[in-house]
Image: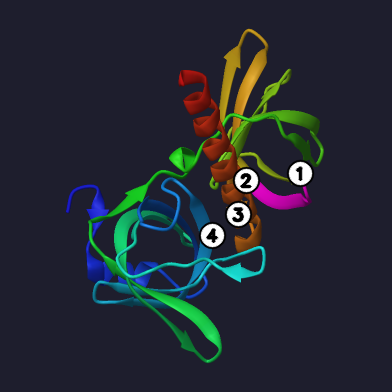
Amino acid sequence: MKGGIEMNDAKNAFSENDALTLNIINSEKLETDQSYVSQIESAFNNSTIIIHNPIVLGHLVPFNNGVELSIYLVSRDAIYNFTGRVVKTFIRDISNLIEIKISSEIKRIQRRDFFRYKTPLELTLTDLGKFESSDVSGGGIGFCSKVEVQLKTKINGYIKMPKENIKFNGTIVRCEKNDKGYSIGVRFDKLENESRELIVKYITAKQLSDRKAKLSKSC
């Protein structure tokens, strides 16, 4: 399959506890375009995936049978996107789970394109100093610098998020000269799944807020 992977390859690519972002496509009860964060409970079995039921403010999100989802999966080596439909919800070993039937090709996407969002976050890099981000995604972060940084430079630091700081190790993958200095891109090489989930959840919340603001202006 061009641009995708076979289902049997997916079984090997995805692992237990890989992070997921669930975007609602069609649902009678859940708001369309809403996003939730989850994890794989067990790896693929043919075209089915078992995931943990997302929890918001201490309550299970009501995923009824038939809810259609666009799913982004962050594995150790890559990021994938596919659509799926909720088959059932159930409890196993006290865990609330959701069985999802995959209904599309599984597409591998570039990390730099994963939920990229332009936002100014405080960024502190060891040996380089403090910066303000130009954009952030689940796969990396961009910022501007007055000095050039060599490509493939290994760095570590943290991002100041609204509720906590997120630590990461990364690699400089872009350094382009512009009127203000240099536009620099960092790829996350080491980032805890919980931290990636926080970034994705922050971005999706911001995107939803932007959409609502645009809709209110058009009314």
The CA span between labels 2 and 4 is 11 Å
Q: Residue drawn at (53%, 46%), measured in percent from left and top?
A: 139
Farthest-out residue, front: 219
In what element is the residue under mark 1? Answer: loop
Name the one closer to the observer, 122 or 205.
205
The CA span between labels 2 and 1 is 9 Å
The CA span between labels 3 and 1 is 14 Å
User: What's the residue type where badge 3 is placed?
Assistant: Arg
Name the one closer to the observer, 195 or 56.
56
The percent position of residue 90, horizontal first and vertical second, equals: 43, 83
- Residue 162 badge: 1
Dot 4 or dot 1: first in sequence order is 4
Callout 2: few (<14), some (14-19), or many (20+) C-alpha neighbours within 10 Å?
some
User: What's the residue type where badge 1 is placed?
Assistant: Pro
The percent position of residue 150, horizontal first and vertical second, equals: 63, 30
Magenta stretch, main secondary structure, is strand
Q: Nearer the viewer, mark 4 or mark 3?
A: 4
Quarter occupied by residue 183: top right
Tell me if residue 118 is in the magenta stretch: no
Q: Residue drawn at (69%, 51%), measured in percent from left and top?
A: 168
Dot 2 or dot 1: first in sequence order is 1
**Pointer 4 residue:** 37
Farthest-out residue, bottom: 93
| Numbered range of the magenta stretch | 160-170
User: What's the residue type where badge 2 is placed?
Assistant: Tyr
Farthest-out residue, left: 1
Could you tell me if the residues under marks 2 and 1 are in contact, i.e. CB atoms within 8 Å?
yes
In what element is the residue under mark 3? Answer: helix
**Pointer 2 residue:** 202
Could you tell me if the residues under marks 4 and 3 are in contact, i.e. CB atoms within 8 Å?
no
Dot 2 or dot 4: first in sequence order is 4
